[in-house]
Image (spheres, grey):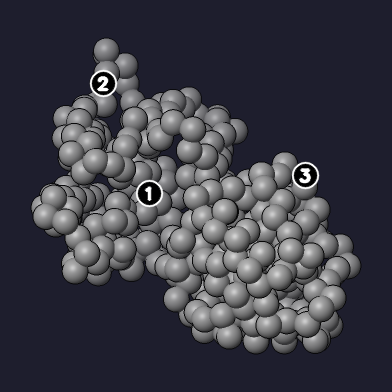
Amino acid sequence: MRILIAANLTPFLQGGAQEHIRGLTQAFREAGHSVECLQLPFAFNPVTEVKRGMDWAESLSMAAPSGQTIDRLIGLQFPAYGVQHPHAVGWVMHQHRAVYELYEPSQAAANLKALREQVHDFDTRCLAPLANAGRLFANSARVAERLNQFNGLKAEPLYHPPPLAERFYCEPAQPYFFFPSRFESLKRQILAIEGFAHLPAGLRLVLAGEGGQLDAAKALAARLDLQDRVHFLGRISQAEKLAWTANALAVVYPPRDEDYGYVTLEAMLAAKPVITCKDSGGPLEFVMHEETGLVAEPTAAGLAQAMAGLAEDAPKASAMGQAGLARYQGMGIGWPAVVDRLLAA
């Protein structure tokens, strides 16, 4: 088949979305299909640019561009899933979160309030035909829940593996917790550091990544006199990430309402328990409390209690990690299954 993947491009912004796009493109090619990726430039601000992006995406028809046949269009991101094709399939990573679950009416400016209605109408208009035809998928059950809550649309959760899934491994646990993620408010590194401050000496918290909240996190560690116990690695290589995960006592990942969360799956592949929170969204689809990790209250005290509990019982932490690996393996997560499901729709 000839397959076109429709997604976004925000210059110099790298993260899980770009890994997802690369992984799907490669999976289609390995399955013997011809695939191209159409990435539309996208800007989150100002709101006029968001509206412009919606209008542009919906105006594009990829039914037979320049006479070239395209058998399937797979739309992944807002607003790229608005690109027109007679056999489009939607696999929604997430919607424009600023006008959905992150929207705060009391703090929203008039232009954002207007955009919210426009985005909701766009999503329902573009995605409802796919849902009615059984061709709408979501990156996770949490993303599917949002589509149903806000747009009244039914989407099938479809899981995929994280990058380098086959390369994760497990080593004996060392006395540190690992937290790899972009530094932003929704990931809640600040909350993890505040919780870690209550743990005894001899333990470390190792954070990897860059982002807008990195300086604030470093300043907090300094104020709490944790410079010798909280370590900031910055951007690390894939090999370093594999090693830091393999040797950790546990992985800490307490985001607010995450869409999916590669960090959770990476920890499970390395047979490490995951500490997450009750409001963390996607990770809760994989972390079973007291079985494959711990689900804490989204407070510093809650995270402190969870970290202390695993630090005090290393055999229990190890058993949870092994249970997490078994759970991942039992879920049948893999790119071949994703390709088959998307093309069968």
Residue 52, percent from left and from top: 18, 34
| Residue at mark 2 to residue at mark 1: CA–CA distance | 21 Å
For disc 1, the marked residue is 91
Can residue 285 be seen from the camera position used here? no
- Residue drawn at the location 20% of the way across and 30% of the way down: 56
> Which mark, by number, is residue 285?
none
For disc 3, the marked residue is 239
For the residue pair 270 and 138, the one nearer the viewer reads as 270
| Residue at mark 3 to residue at mark 1: CA–CA distance | 30 Å
Tell me how many marks there are: 3
Q: Where is 67 relative to 31, above or below?
A: above
For disc 2, the marked residue is 64
Which residue is the extreme one toward the right? 172
Q: The residue tagged with tag 1: helix, strand or loop? A: strand
- Residue drawn at the location 67% of the way across and 59% of the way down: 207
Label 1 Cα neighbours within 10 Å, binned few <14 / some 14-19 / many ≥20: many
